Amino acid sequence: MTSSTRLILIPSLVLAFVLCDLVTNRVAIASVNGDAAPNTRAGASESFDSAVGESTEYRWNVDDKRSPLLGLPDANLKPGLDRSITYPIAQSNFPIFQSLSYDEENGRYLLPSISKESKGVHFITLEPTESKNTYASTDGTNLKLIDNDSLKTVRAADGTRYTFVRYPDGEFRCASIKDASGASLSMLYAANGLMLHGVVDSSGRTLTFNYASAGITSVTQTWMANSEGLTKTWAVGDSASLDTKSVKYSHVVGLNSLKVLPNNAMVRQYTAEMGASDKMLAQLFGGPSAVAGANGFEPAGLAGQYPLYRGDIVGDDGLVRRGHLSYAMHLYGSADGRGDSPLYVPAGFTSHSAQPSPTDGVVTFYYPQLGNLSDVTLAVFHVADFQISNEGERVRIGNIGGPGGATLAYKHSHIEFYRGNAGLPALSARPGLRIDPSTVFAPQSSESARPAIGAN
C-alpha cells in the first residue's frame, strides 16, 4: 500500500452504516439506494440524506459468530460503500471516521454526531470541568472526555467508551469502541494512519476494504464456522468478475479522481478562481514545483490523505465550525505532498522571531504593509533549516517540513496571517485574529479585499 492513499469518509450521500447494539444484534446498514435487503426490520436504521431516498436495512451478524460480521447480499454491492459508518452515542449517532476536534477559541472539544431527528450534522460540546484533563457535555447527553494528550477517551452514560488516537496528520480519529459488556470494534488504519483498512470485532471476524484508483472495489470478510476459517469477497459496482489480486489494499496507487464534500460544507465547489489563488500563493511562498491549499481544499493529489475539503462546515444548529484550512494555508513541495521545497516569505517585514519554536518550527514576521493589507503578522509553521537569505522580492527562510510538518506520508508547512503586530498569539486568540490568505494578495474588489477574520 502506498502511503498517499486514504479512504475519504463524509457524513452523507449514497450509503450509511449504523452500528447499534453490539450485544443484541439490533444492528443494520441503512442504504439510501432503495435496494432490496434480507433480514429487514422496520425502524432499525437511519438514513442521513433523506432527500436521496428511503432506507433499506441489512443486519450485522453480531450474535452469530459463525457468520460474517456484516450481512451482505449475494449481488454486487452498490458504489459508495465508503461514505459513512456511525455508532450510537447518547441520542445521536457518531460518524466514527470523523475527527474529534478542539475549539481553540473556547477551550473545548467538539464531537460530531448525526442528529436522529433532523439527520443533520450536530456537534456535541464537551466543556472543561473542575477535574484536571476532564471535559463533559452540557446538552444532557451525559458524555465525559478524558484528555491524556495523544489519547482521548469519551465515555457515554451506558458505559460505552470511544477511544481517539492522534494520527500523523495531527487529527484524532476513533480507534476503538467498547461497550459495557466488553464487546468491541477496532478500526484498522493503514501504516501511516490516514486510511481505513477495515474493522475487526472482539471475536476476531474482520471486514476489509479493497481499493483501486476509483475507490473501494470490493469488501472481504473472514469468520469461523464449524472450526473452519472462511473468507469471502463481495464486489462493489457492476464488475462481472473480480480479480482480487488487482484490488489488493497494498496495491493502491492513489485516489486522485475522488472529489467528495460533506453535506454541511459551506463551500460547495473548488473554482477556477480558487485554483488561481492557490497557484499564486504557491509561487510566492514555495519553489518551482510547490503546491498550495489556501481556499479550504487540499491539492487534488492529496485526496489519498485527506478529504479535499477542509474548510468551514455548519452544524444543524446553524453554527459555523472552522476547518483546519479555514483562514490558513498548506504549502507542499509537490502535488502528492512528498516533494521538497524551499520556503520563502515576501520581503518587507520589519521584525521576525529569532528562531523557530522547538515543537512546531514556527517563525513569525511583522509587516507594516503586506499585499492588500496593513499591520499584519505572518506565521509560518514547520520551518526546516531556518535561515534568512534575501532574494529580491522574496526572502528565503529555509525549507518545508520542519517539526510537526514532516511524516512518512507527506511534508508541508502551515501558514497563517494575523491582524496586528501579534507575534504568535495564544491558541484561544488565533481564531479571532486570522485573515483569509486568499484575500491578502488577491486583486482589490469589494469581495476579495475584505479581510475575512476567522472568528466562530
Image: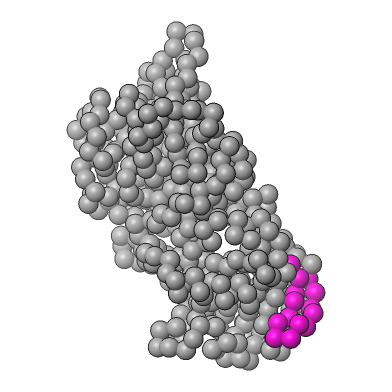
Judge whether 113 appears above or below 357 on screen. above
Q: Percent position (x, y) of residue 32?
A: 26, 42
Q: Percent position (x, y) of residue 160?
A: 43, 37
Q: Can you say which quadrant of the picture contains the C terminus?
A: bottom left
Q: Can you say which quadrant of the picture contains the N terminus?
A: top right
Describe residue 166's horizontal placement relative to residue 73 as left or right: right
Residue 284 position by quadrant = bottom right
- Whether residue 152 appears in magenta in the rendering, the answer is no
Q: Percent position (x, y) of residue 210?
A: 49, 34
Between residue 162 and residue 245, name the one nearer to us. Answer: 245
Is residue 398 among what the camera can see? yes
* Residue at the farthest front position: 240
Between residue 211 and residue 40, name the one nearer to us. Answer: 211
Describe residue 408's horizontal placement relative to residue 74 as left or right: right
Query: Who's the residue at 47% across and 51% down the image?
Result: 257
Is residue 131 among what the camera can see? no
Judge whether 108 appears above or below 237 on screen. below
Query: Who's the residue at 47% across and 72% down the image?
Result: 274
Query: Who's the residue at 51% across and 66% down the image?
Result: 325
Query: Who's the residue at 48% across and 28% down the image?
Result: 243
Q: Which residues are magenta?
A: 386-399
Residue 80 position by quadrant = top left
> Coloured how?
one colour
Q: Main secondary structure of the magenta part?
A: strand
Describe residue 274's horizontal placement relative to residue 370 as left or right: left
Q: Percent position (x, y) of residue 331?
A: 62, 67
Judge whether 98 appears above or below 380 on screen. above
